[in-house]
Image (cartoon, rainbow, N blue to C red):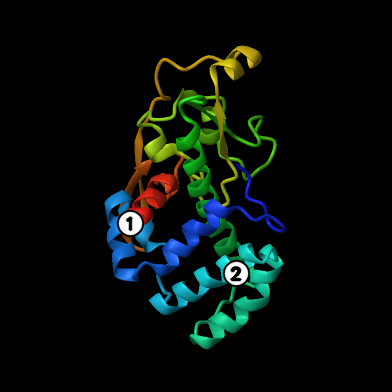
Amino acid sequence: MATPETGVRFEEAIDFLRRRLALPQARWLELMREVDAAARDRSAGMSDALVQDIIAEVLAAIEDGSGLPGFLEGWDDITGRHGWTDESGGRRAELAFRIMTAQAYAAGRWQQIQRLKRVRPYLRYVHVDPELLQPSSRPEHAHWHGTVLPVDHEWWLTHYPPNGWNCRCYVQSLSERDLARYGWQVDAEAPAERTVIKWVRGRAVETPAGIDPGFAVNWGMVGLKLAA
């Protein structure tokens, strides 16, 4: 599911961010250790208070429909208030917004998928550029394009998108009728996996090939844990 940038109010995504904002940072880090240890390192260099204020600004931008432009308006004020300097020329602000909204929308979408899985029991992985026409496209994600597996297949625990920085992949939920209509079939098994070692801030991190460190996470499952 592509993440809208403006004008979209997605209640399940908003609920995810509200619950994330209400959760003490110590509990959030504990939760991240449970699902993917590398995920907790993505905000390194930022104080807990700064991270919370950024989340609150993302939430406000989604709630009022101002989207990315609204979030960017408040970025300098937030970071300046905490004495944190962003020397990226706004790139880090945009990246933070896109990642947080992608996670929130993925979590909200997962809630919908779970509610409908009796009638739409399959998911199909979709890569927006399967022909790899764009230099930034990831070959592994293109390889996964078209993979159809049951909603509860363990592959989705690590490969439910987003799967990396600026990843725009998403899933389609499918019924038996959808499969027949489009001529798709449920795969007998998930794509072959291998793990790779990547270095993150001087630390070796093992992650599935094609997935950035900290992104081997099903944000829908994280959302369910937040709601527990």
Residue 76, image x, y percentages? 61, 81
- Counting from the top left corner in percent of width and height, residue 42 is at 42, 62
Residue 221 x/y as whole percent = 38, 45
Q: Nearer the viewer, mark 1 or mark 2?
A: 2
- Identify the residue at image location x=45%, y=24%: 149
**CA gap, disc 1 and disc 2:** 24 Å
Q: Label 1 is placed on what type of residue?
A: Met
171 sits left or right of 158 in the view? right
Could one spot residue 47 in this view of the protein? no
Specify whether residue 122 is in view: yes
Q: Is residue 16 above or below residue 138?
A: below
49 and 42: which one is in front? Answer: 49
Is label 2 in a helix, a strand or a loop?
helix
- How many labels, in total? 2
Q: Which mark is residue 60?
A: 2
The amino acid type found where label 2 is placed reads Ala
Q: Which residue is mark 1?
A: 32
Residue at 27% from the left image edge and 52% from the top image edge: 34
